[in-house]
Image: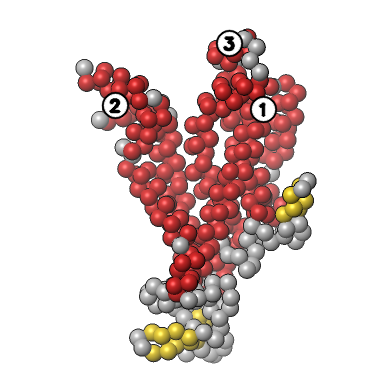
Amino acid sequence: MTVLSTDVANQCRGPWATAFRRLMRDRAALAALAAFLLIVLMCLLAPVYAHWAGVEPFKSTLNATIIIDGQERPVMELPTEGLALGYTPIGPTWSLGNYFLGADNQGRDVMARLLYGGLNSFLIAGAATIFTLTFATLFGVTAGFFGGVIDMVLSRILDVLWAFPVYLLAISLSVVMITQSITIGPIVIESGSLWLPIFIIGLIYIPYVARPIRGQVMALRNSDFVMAAIGLGAPSSRIMRKDILPNITTTLIVFVPIMMALNMLTESALSFLSIGVQPPDASWGTIIQDGQGLLYTRPVVALAPGLMIVASVLSLNVFGDGLRDALDPKSKIKLGRSG
């Protein structure tokens, strides 16, 4: 009697309310989402932190000094061991607002650059995800619904992109485009702009999203309710908008955290190779590159952004798994058995 009442209650709530209820019961997914949102919030406060600390994250400060335990110390210190050549940036002070994670090889506050770099990484990953999902949906729905010549042409275009390994294609496009502006009709993307990695990363992942959407739309195209709408003479645009799109919405939602994680990794790789985010802007990938020469003296410069990437990608993947299980109708069997 209790099981029957629960099933009836779930049906009355509707599919979205039921999915939300399942997600709220997934503690791992909620914890991952909270961790990700906390990291995003910290990065959004980057301008506030830089103003409070009184630092310039994008300007060299080789002659700067700070106060530690009442004593004034230079940010760039002369080494006391070896040949004593060059300068070594100050290490972490573990004091917020006072070079908490130390300085990089140009005397810049690593903590401030870490937050600003995360802000750019999230901006690029988020915008590239929207770009990918928008065009993948457009190509996948059009090809899957109309079929025939339209499907063949769009599928061959996607196959060309699919044929290249992801990072090889991304690196090739970046090397070609990073030194010159791109003009697409009235839109001009200047070299060094953040829109350049957004465009490249968003473009290379379109086939990976468009293909499953196309397959799902092809199955929906032969379903009874779509065939009935076609038989009644409903316009194709209305069928795609009212019947097709609502039924692939859950797939698109599940793709969001997955694509965000992939885009963050891709952006970090390109920026580490100096073909992604360009100076004076920063991202976690560029900060890792800056800290590459300091691995033996100031490893925190490279380790801090690396750990932030790991934490962000891991939380997105865990939340994505929970979101997929919540939106999958079959998951109610597992919940019923466990509860």
165 vs 156: above or below: below
Give the SS element for disc 3. Answer: helix
> What residue is shown at x 41% (from left), y 44% (from top)?
318
Q: Could you tell me the amino acid type at mark 1? A: Thr
> What residue is shown at x 56% (from left), y 51% (from top)?
125
Taking the image as shown, residue 74 lies to the left or right of residue 217, namely: left
Locate the C terminus by quadrant: top left
Discs 1, 3 touching: Cβ within 8 Å: no
Towards the viewer: 18 or 152: 18
Taking the image as shown, residue 135 lies to the left or right of residue 323, namely: right
User: What's the CA distance linking mark 2 and mark 3?
Assistant: 35 Å
216 vs 207: above or below: above
Q: Dot 1 surroundings within 10 Å: few (below 14), some, or many (20 or more)?
A: some
Instruction: Pick whichever of labels 1 and 3 is earlier in the sequence.
Output: 1
What's the colour scheme?
secondary structure
Q: Could you tell me the amino acid type at mark 2? A: Gly
Towards the viewer: 219 or 53: 53
Instruction: Pick whichever of labels 2 and 3 is earlier in the sequence.
Output: 3
Taking the image as shown, residue 197 lies to the left or right of residue 338, namely: right
Give the SS element for disc 1. Answer: helix
Query: Which residue position holds label 3?
Result: 228
223 vs 311: above or below: above
Query: Which residue position holds label 2?
Result: 336
Percent of width and height locating residue 62: 56, 83
Instruction: Pick whichever of labels 1 and 2 is earlier in the sequence.
Output: 1
Query: Which residue position holds label 1?
Result: 142
Towards the viewer: 144 or 168: 144
